[in-house]
Structure formats: C-alpha cells, structure tokens
Image: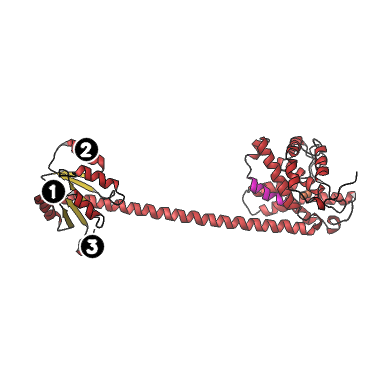
C-alpha cells in the first residue's frame, strides 16, 4: 500500500454532517489521502474524474441518501467495484442488512473507536487489492491460454498441411509412373465422397461410418494404389491386355501397398489415417462374391472401405482410357457397375450408386473426351 506523497491511497468520505467529515478525516489522514464530500450528488460529480480506492458513505443524507447512492454506484461500470463502507448513526439491523445486500462491504455504526475504523478500512483495502490481483492473474491466465491455444492450432495446422503435401506428392509419384491413369487418385477421391455422402443421406451402414472422419478418410484413400511402385514398368505401361502371369504380378500391388503403409506406421503410434489407408490398399480389389484378390474375402468380410473403393475404383477405370481400352461413357460405366450388383460389388452400395449416379455424371469427364464403346 502506498503511504507517502501523491501516490497515497485515496479514500472518499461522504456525509452531510461536517463535524463527522472532519472527525473521519482526522482518524484516517495520517495513512491515506482523505477527500471529504458533503453530498451524494457531489460524490458522483467527483467520481467521473477521481475514483478513490474506497468510499465511506453516510446513510442519512438529504436529497439522495446512502442507500440510493450505493444503488447508483453499483449500476455504474466504473464505480461498481469500488468498495463501500456505510457509516451511520442509525443502528437498526434492517438497514445494515439492506446495505450489505446492496453490495456494501461493511457497516460501521457511530459512535465508533478510531482504531476500529482504521483497522476495518485497512482490511477492506487489502481485500480489494487481493481481488484486483486475482482478477489481473485471471486475465493473464486467460491470455496465456488463448495464446497457447492459438499456437497449438497453428502448429496442428502446419503439421496437417505438411502431411497433405507429402501425401499428395507420394500419390503423384505413384501416378507419374503409371501415367496412363493420370488423375485417377483425385477422381476416386471424388467418387468416394459422393458414395459416402449417399450412405449418410440414406442412413446406411451408419454404425460403421459414424466413427469415421470423412475428410481424413478421403485423404487416406489416396494411398490405395501406392503398391504399384513395386510393379515393373513393362507391366504397368503395357499397351494391351496382360498375360495371366503379368496379371498375377499386377495383383501384388495391394499387398505391397499394405506393406509400405505398415512401414510408415512402424515409427508411429496408432493412427486412424494409416489404418484407413492400409484397408483401402489391401482390400480395394476384393469382390463381394469372393472372387477378388488378394484374399478372396467375400461379403461383409471385406471391410466397408474396400467395398466402397471397389465401386469408385472400377467406375474410374471404366470412364478412363487404359492401354487395353478406350474410355466408356458414364452410362456404360454405370450399367457395368449395376450389373456387378451382388457379384463384384456390395448390393447395398450398388443401390446407393444407382441413387447418386447423376452426381457421378455431373462430376465426370467432359463428353468430348469420351469415346462410345461399340456394342
Ligand atoms: Fe488398385
Ligand atoms: Fe486404383
């Protein structure tokens, strides 16, 4: 607490009785700067420019009494936190309770002993200082938390950005070897999103997909063909149908993809992204009737990710030029997907495909790039 010179703590005493004002001032002025004010109106005119650390307020005053003055103090944004002690000759418990209810910090009845007044003023000033310190600390802590949160968000954002960049590059590296399927990864992503939104709209497989973070999952699908990195150029770029040996070799890309993803995961803790990636890579060539590869899984033995990807992947292969065939039209591709209902593809998913196939058409390749298949 300041005890000397201009920086001493300021106390305002408000009382219509000049003798009382003088007395209180004499008791407190040794330690504080005491301003005596003869009315509540005068107090308010001074408060605008000169807020004290504490107000001693008389109750019985003409015009505005202490109770009214306290109410008004509590309404003012700048004045509501100034501690107020009532000093009054009135000695009835009712006005004491009213005063305390309205927010006075204490109530001193006249006559009082000077040391008691000094002590109570000192206690309330100390409490006020503690309150202000705590408020300050609370604000500091809040600022600190806000900053920390911002920093964490920035860091997380840049880690995610890095992850996206590395992933896109890896997917592009795989695609650049297999240049004939350029854009396949980005397009299958689009087809997957349409299928997933369809599932959500129709409330199908909702138990499985409710746990999925759709954006994370779509990103993770980009690695589904990462295993093609192990397939030789002569097979990958062969202009024509593969021999059965070559096809066996080509089939290895799903198991090899899963191995690459396992390798990435070796130095990481469990991660949803890699879990999805691995399932996509390993199971996107399985078929509903058990005739797919690598494990001849059938029906719901095939994880849902793989079943959805099978449709997205095949649809995209159909509407794209491949060394052994020209691109099919959307209508032809849709027809083939629907014919695969219950054999190649999950029948529930084919039904969803049928409902959303117009979205595939709208997002597909421009008509001029499509060469109709001769039937
Ligand atoms: Fe594949
Ligand atoms: Fe693929």
* C-beta proximity under 8 Å, tags 1 and 3: no
Q: Is residue 329 visible?
A: yes
The stretch of residues the image draws in magenta is 210-224
Label ID, residue 7: 3
- Using a 10 Å C-alpha cutoff, classify the residue at mark 1 as few (fewer than 14 neighbours), some (14 to 19) or many (20 or more): some
Residue at (19% x, 48% y) in the render: 40
Residue at (20% x, 64% y) in the render: 5
Most common SS among magenta residues = helix
Q: Is residue 52 visible?
A: no
Calculate the distance from the C-alpha at mark 2 to the C-alpha at mark 3.
Answer: 34 Å
Q: Earlier in the sequence, mark 2 or mark 3?
A: 3
Look at the image and say whether residue 19 sits in the magenta stretch.
Answer: no
Q: Is residue 267 left or right of residue 185?
A: left
Look at the image and say whether residue 213 sits in the magenta stretch.
Answer: yes
Q: Is residue 189 left or right of residue 118?
A: right
Q: Secondary structure at mark 2?
A: helix
Q: Which residue is mark 2?
A: 97
Residue at the outermost front position = 63
Quarter of the image for residue 166 reads bottom right
């Amino acid at each position: 607490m300041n005890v000397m010179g201009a920086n001493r703590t300021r106390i305002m005493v408000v009382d219509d009785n000049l003798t009382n004002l003088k007395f209180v001032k004499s008791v407190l002025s040794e330690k504080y700067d005491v301003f005596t004010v003869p009315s509540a109106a005068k107090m308010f005119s001074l408060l605008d420019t000169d807020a004290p650390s504490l107000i001693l307020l008389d109750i019985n005053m003409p015009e505005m009494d202490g109770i009214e003055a306290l109410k008004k103090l509590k309404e003012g944004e700048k004045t509501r936190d100034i501690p107020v002690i009532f000093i009054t000759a009135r000695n009835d418990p009712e006005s004491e309770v009213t005063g305390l209810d309205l927010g006075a910090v204490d109530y001193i009845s006249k006559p009082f002993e000077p040391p008691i007044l000094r002590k109570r003023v000192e206690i309330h000033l100390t409490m006020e200082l503690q309150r202000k310190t705590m408020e300050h600390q609370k604000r500091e802590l809040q600022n600190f938390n806000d900053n920390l949160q911002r920093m964490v968000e920035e860091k997380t954002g840049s880690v995610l950005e890095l992850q996206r960049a590395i992933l896109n590059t890896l997917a592009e590296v795989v695609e650049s070897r297999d240049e004939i399927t350029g854009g396949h990864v980005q397009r299958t992503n689009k087809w997957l999103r349409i299928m997933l939104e369809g599932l959500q709209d129709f409330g199908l497989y909702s138990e499985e997909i409710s746990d999925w973070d759709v954006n994370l999952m779509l990103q993770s699908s980009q690695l589904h063909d990462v295993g093609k990195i192990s397939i030789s150029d002569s097979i990958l770029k062969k202009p024509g149908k593969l021999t059965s040996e070559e096809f066996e070799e080509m089939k290895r890309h799903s198991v090899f993809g899963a191995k690459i993803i396992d390798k990435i995961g070796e130095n990481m803790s469990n991660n949803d992204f890699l879990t999805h990636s691995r399932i996509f890579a390993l199971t996107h060539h399985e078929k509903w009737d058990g005739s797919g590869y690598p494990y001849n899984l059938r029906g719901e033995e095939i994880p849902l990710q793989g079943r959805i990807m099978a449709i997205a992947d095949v649809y995209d292969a159909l509407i794209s030029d491949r060394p052994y065939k020209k691109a099919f039209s959307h209508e032809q591709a849709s027809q083939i997907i629907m014919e695969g209902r219950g054999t190649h593809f999950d029948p529930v998913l084919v039904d969803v495909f049928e409902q959303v196939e117009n979205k595939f058409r709208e997002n597909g390749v421009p008509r001029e790039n499509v060469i109709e298949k001769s039937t």
